[in-house]
Amino acid sequence: MTSNLSELAATANSLVAPAKGILAADESTGTIAKRLESINVENTESARRTYREMLFRTEGAADYVSGVILFDETLRQTAADETPMVNLLTDQGIIPGIKVDAGAKSLAGGSSGELVTEGLDGLRERLFEYRQIGARFAKWRAVITIGNASPTSACIDVNAHALARYAALCQEAGLVPIVEPEVLMEGGHSIETAEEVTEATLREVFRQLSIQNVNPEGMLLKPNMVVSGYDQLNRARATEVAERTVRAFLHTVPASMPGIVFLSGGQNDEDAIVNLQAIAKRGVAMRAPWELSYSYGRGLQAAPLKAWGGKPENVPAAQAAFLERCRLTSAARSGAYAVT
Ligand code: 13P
């Protein structure tokens, strides 16, 4: 292993250390606006800082959080007492990461609603700067929608190609790429369709990663779980979700990759945990070669956001809610969550 690769592999392994997972706090300014709007808080830079600083200063969360994905603004921001946000994390042994894509845009020539993620132009320079500021890993999210005429193979191909270009640039810059091909759960599709599309997407993503010389040992995958579309009436239960999810990975993901960190994708808090635990247990039963963990945004933040409500007096309650979500998600990842 070259020293660059062994460092990447060490970081990737630390991010999926036993009982730990990732907090995704990298909402773009537009997405965090929606979250803050839901609690009637104006989307100002100071509100974003106050909210995120509250999460990062939650005592005990470092037992469950190995890394935090930041948005560009946060990576460069200081806390209220002028401590760089990055230092708030590294002082607790938490690894800072950075979202580097420029968002999913309408795909020209695609079927209705299909998207392609932008952000490759100038990425090499940005990655070197992010590493200097302190990031050790990065994230790029591609979005695949399921509809009557989607996904098209063109949509899967261009998104997989861009993910691999991003991942290769990350490894060159000394950042662990988190490769996120998210098959959206929105829609009325069956779990069979979700499995088929997820597997086809992963197959193309790993084909492109291999063609573009991305080393699986120095990267992580951040996928959706294979679940029924949200609008399905009889949605599949956790054991079926787990079986189909783990099977899709066993068919497509190299054994040398250290870990798979799931997104929560808008599942309710209970589903995000129960499904994660079922997948973790299925992984053990099937002798899956990767750590199976989490990289949750909404799954960790929905409860503290609500408990906070933008009020300083609610900070202790919000931090307690955040710690509890972290504790439960970690327990699920270790197969130790008591299903009620
Ligand atoms: P959710 O867990 O809310 O899906 O967010 C994770 C993420 O980082 C999406 O890119």
Image: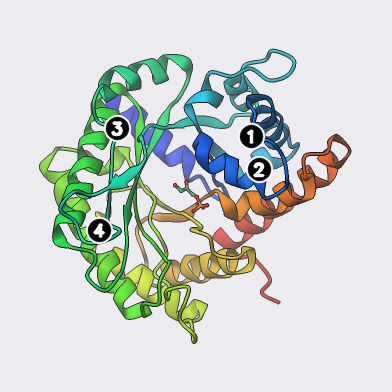
Q: Nearer the viewer, mark 4 or mark 3?
A: 3
Judging by the rendered image, the residue that carries numbered circle 4 is 202
Q: Look at label 4 and name its amino acid.
A: Leu
Q: Look at label 1 and name its amino acid.
A: Asn
Q: Would you identify the image quadrant in which residue 58 lies? A: top right
Residue nearest the viewer, comparing 268 with 2: 268
Residue at 28%, 37% (x, y): give it.
118
* Residue 314, image x, y percentages: 85, 42
Judging by the rendered image, the residue that carries numbered circle 2 is 36
Q: Nearer the viewer, mark 4 or mark 1?
A: 1
Query: Is 299 left, or right, of 178 in this rendering?
Result: right
Q: Look at label 3 and name its amino acid.
A: Gly
| Mark 4 or 3, nearer chain start | 3
| Mark 3 or 2, nearer chain start | 2
In space, the residues marked 4 and 2 are separated at their CA atoms by 33 Å
In space, the residues marked 1 and 2 are separated at their CA atoms by 6 Å
* Residue 240, image x, y percentages: 43, 80
**Quarter of the rendering occupied by the N terminus:** top left
**Quarter of the rendering occupied by the C terminus:** bottom right
Image vertical order of residue 49 relative to residue 33, above or below? above
In space, the residues marked 4 and 1 are separated at their CA atoms by 36 Å
| Mark 4 or 2, nearer chain start | 2
| Mark 1 or 3, nearer chain start | 1
Q: Which structural element holds mark 1?
A: loop
Judging by the rendered image, the residue that carries numbered circle 1 is 43
Residue 119, label in figure: 3
**Pointers 1 and 2 in contact (C-beta within 8 Å):** yes
Residue at 52%, 69% (x, y): give it.
275
Query: Is 81 left, or right, of 221 in this rendering?
Result: right
**Pointers 4 and 1 in contact (C-beta within 8 Å):** no
In space, the residues marked 3 and 2 are separated at their CA atoms by 25 Å
Q: Would you identify the image quadrant in which residue 9 lies? A: top left
